Image (cartoon, rainbow, N blue to C red):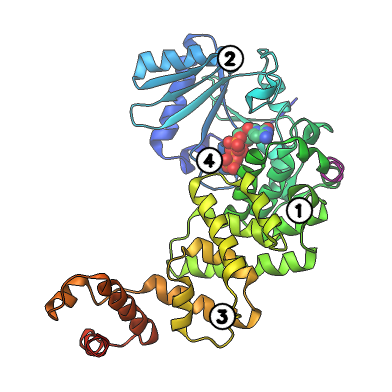
Amino acid sequence: HPTKRQVTQTMRKKFPSSIYQLLVSIGDQAAKLSMAPYLIGGMVRDLLLDKDNKDMDIVVEGNGIQLALHLQATYGGSVRQHEEFKTATWKHPSGFLIDLTSARTEYYDFPAALPKVEMSTIKEDLFRRDFSINAMAISLNYESFGELLDYFHGYEDLISGKIRVLYNLSFVEDPTRILRSLRFESRFDFRMDTQTEKLAHQSANNILSVSKQRLANELCRLFYEGNASHGVNRLYELELHTYLVTNPIKHEIAANRIRELEDYHRDLHQKGLAISRSVWIGYMAALTYGDSKDIRELEDYCLSKEDQTVLNKIEELIHHLNQDLVNAPIATFHEHFSTYSLESLLGFLAFIHQDAKKSFIDYLIKRERLQRKITGNDLKELGLTPSPLFKELLYKAEVFQLQSSTITKREILEKLTGQY
Ligand code: CTP
């Protein structure tokens, strides 16, 4: 029997009233079809942790698609069906997305291994999931609305900060769960329990059977969402690193590189600089020696065009920058880096001389904050006609501004007039 707890009050307090009402309506409508719906997964976990989560996952004892169509007929919106998975996404008229799934006994999230979908009970459905903290459900049924169904001590684990698998083959069945467990450790400052850690360690080589793209999805989130240093230390402790890149750098060096990158990344973010997800490729690069072979193999991990560009640019810098930049003036930094994106340059940090790093970061901040005081129009007003010289002069104007934050527009123009 599950531990039962009433969480209606918590739901009322924490969810916006539109979401709360939506859940009540789903319960009411399901009752008309004699189906039993449950809110499950991340939204339940995060409700109990007092964190926001907008992924509404509903598991139905009954037919999820039928319920979705019924909700659409009643309230409007649109439905996308996935017949083979017995799931549907209902887009509420407000635009909010709700996933409705028929309770089933097997877990899969990629089509290569499609098991026969068998309808089952909520308990069986929860048992096939990854960790106890993700395997709780809240009943949306009219008579038991707000009851937390917790068959596997998820609530206890949530309170004590434990990541625990529900069965021994969990990581073998889905090795990406090993990376998920590190992500949840990092995000919530939780820890695997002893048995889960042992299983993760034993199953580490199974990640070889997972496509680089699926691994990339998890790794990107591991580096971008939480405490990357923790994530990387755990990758090494569980000996996953050897399966991620052919020639991983030593643990200690990796730990230092990642800590540094993470600290600067956080610092720049806090200073208001916009850094895209693609910086994650830089974290991956930091785990390698930086030889051309190491870096090139990361190509398989790229999730987007931007990831590709960041990778190419890091590689370009590793191979073409032949100056250590120690004590270099800011103009030299701009000369080398003005055309590179912030993400590529952060990703290159690990390969810069230790004594040049502070100036490198100072340069990045100044460059990103630079508000150009001189435009092409100003040059025209000096009586110049547009020509390739414009680009050069505008670049020089940038350098003057980087060199002095207080320089005025007039002073820049004066300096420029001496240059042509
Ligand atoms: N799940 C699983 N095994 C996986 C992926 C997901 O068992 N490899 C289950 C978990 O029960 C999870 C649910 O599917 O709670 C939804 O998965 P997902 O949306 O990926 O994760 P969340 O738990 O919602 O986490 P996040 O907040 O990071 O999205």
Q: Quadrant of the N terminus?
A: top right
Indicate whether residue 202 is drawn in magenta: yes
Of marks 1 and 4, the one in the foreground: 1
Label at residue 380: none
Residue at 53% across, 16% down = 64
What residue does disc 2 label?
84
Give the residue type at disc 2: Glu
Separation of disc 4 and disc 3 at Cα? 47 Å
Give the residue type at disc 3: Lys
Q: Height in image: 275 above or below 55?
A: below
What residue does disc 3 label?
358
What residue does disc 4 label?
10
Q: Is residue 195 left or right of residue 6?
A: right
Separation of disc 3 and disc 2 at Cα? 55 Å
- Residue neighbourhood size for the residue with mark 4, other residues' Cα within 10 Å, grouped as few (<14), some (14–19), many (≥20): few
- Disc 1, SS: helix
Indicate whether residue 221 is drawn in magenta: no
Q: Nearer the viewer, residue 365 or 409?
A: 409
Q: Which residues are magenta?
A: 198-203
Label at residue 235: 1
Q: Nearer the viewer, residue 310 or 77?
A: 310
Q: Which label's residue is closer to the chain start, 2 or 1?
A: 2
Q: Nearer the viewer, residue 290 or 19?
A: 290
